[in-house]
Image: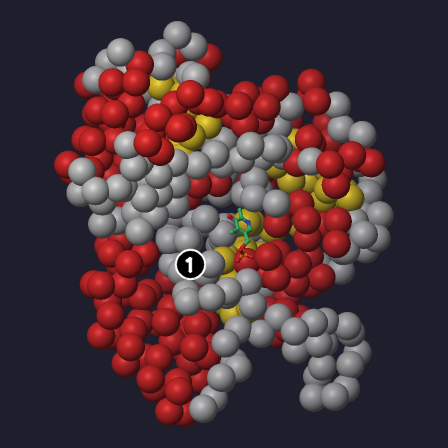
Amino acid sequence: MTPIPLLDLTAQYATIRTEVEKALLQVVESQHFILGPEVEKLEKALAGYLECKHAVGVSSGTDALLVALMAIDLRPGDEVIVPTYSFFATAGVVARLQAVPVFVDIDPLTFNIDPGRIEPRITARTRAIIPVHLFGQSAEMDELMRIARQHGLRVIEDAAQAIGAQYRDGRRAGSIGDLGCFSFFPTKNLGCFGDGGLVTTQDAELAEKLRVLRVHGARPKYYHKIIGGNFRLDAIQAAVLNAKLPHLDGWSAKRRQNADVYSRLFVAAGLARDGAPPGDAEGDPVVISQAVYRGSAASSYHVYNQYVIRVRERARLRPYLADKGIGNEIYYPVPFHRQECFASLRCRDQDYPQANTAADTSLALPMFPELSEPQLEFVVQAIRDFYR
Ligand SMILES: *Cc1c(COP(=O)(O)O)cnc(C)c1O
């Protein structure tokens, strides 16, 4: 079997090469490289797709989060509640504005922020919550929005890994909170050829502010009532995304199908039990959390930016898989409360048992739309052989 990488972007490019090349050439011919018609076309298309009134293209997913926090006027010393288990940007943007990230433990079934642990962390300084739809599955938004509204907090959804994901009743990830943030980093489900991002909102005033902040806070040009930054999206990136967007739902469906095959094979191999929650499955070599396995059947629509399981003996399993040419990765080895740069926050490690366990046991397996059934079987067989 040829190596199976964690992600194979060349396989996808082969299927869309002509459309993308045509779109790229058009931008080059126009010599219009920053914002402009391609970006406007993308914003319109994505606002429709994501069921949001407004969509603002920006320079990256990180900048989407940063400019969203600037749009709600986050001040130094303000507190923002974030899950302790996510990609660094979720917490980094808060600290960069001299505000304080307040970390909350995760739900072991979904790896997402545990809404039940949010209220005790709310203080008079809390301004916002940033739920992350980790690995492509929506966080528990109903409970979260109830808490936020009751305490007068803003909600900024970090949907970087979850474009096209749906929460109950088909609501799109990124359309439920005050602002939704997306990334077009090449490894995300809708990736461009560099950095790119998007902020969505249903609020016309916030949308207008995002557009002004994106160009250094200027309105009109060279007149600055507020201070923004260079958060602009390139036309080249927008053109790539415009060409890819019509394929996104098909790719998401393939990812879900691949995830279902993985989970079925793990259960059939006797490595995991059908829907056993992590606590009940401690003796199993592989734990497929209920939410992952049930993702496709349940009312929420998981788009599997990553397929993440929990495993025993991870330190030995990883080199074994690598030796067989099977890509694998740890998302994430160090939760925020354990990061050196946040040591001054004096977090108590024992407040985060679920994130700590996830950091010690989680393993991401190869996941992309073009994976074949024999490849999925090869991965599961290799893992079965390891535990035999
Ligand atoms: C990728 C990612 C980001 C940052 O996006 P960039 O485009 O890489 O800046 C933020 N949050 C999460 C959860 C991510 O996965």
The residue positioned farthest toward the top in the image shown: 283
85 is higher (above) or lower (below) than 317: below
Comparing 41 with 324, the one in front is 324
Point out residue 178 in the picture as x, y percentages from the top left corner.
59, 55
Horizontal arrangement in the rendering, residue 148 relative to residue 361 (left or right):
right
Q: In which quarter of the image is residue 278?
A: top left
* Residue shown at 41% from the left, 65% from the top: 192
Point out residue 219 in the picture as x, y percentages from the top left corner.
70, 84
Comparing 313 with 160, the one in front is 313
Q: Disc 1 residue type?
A: Pro
228 is higher (above) or lower (below) than 197: below
The residue positioned farthest toward the left in the image shown: 374
Q: List the residue tagged with mark 1.
A: 186
Q: From the image, which quarter does the N terminus lie in? A: top left
Point out residue 114 in the picture as x, y percentages from the top left corner.
57, 29
* Residue shown at 59% from the left, 57% from the top: 62
Q: Can residue 299 be seen in this view?
A: no
Q: Is residue 21 visible?
A: yes
Point out residue 37 in the picture as x, y percentages from the top left corner.
44, 84
Q: Quadrant of residue 383?
A: top left
187 is higher (above) or lower (below) than 33: above
Horizontal arrangement in the rendering, residue 214 relative to residue 133 (left or right):
right
Comparing 74 with 170, the one in front is 74
Q: What element carries label 1?
A: loop
Mark 1: C-beta under 8 Å from nearest atom of ligand 1: no
* Residue shown at 77% from the left, 72% from the top: 227
Tell how many labels: 1
17 is higher (above) or lower (below) than 11: below
Comparing 62 with 383, the one in front is 383
* Residue shown at 28% from the left, 32% from the top: 324
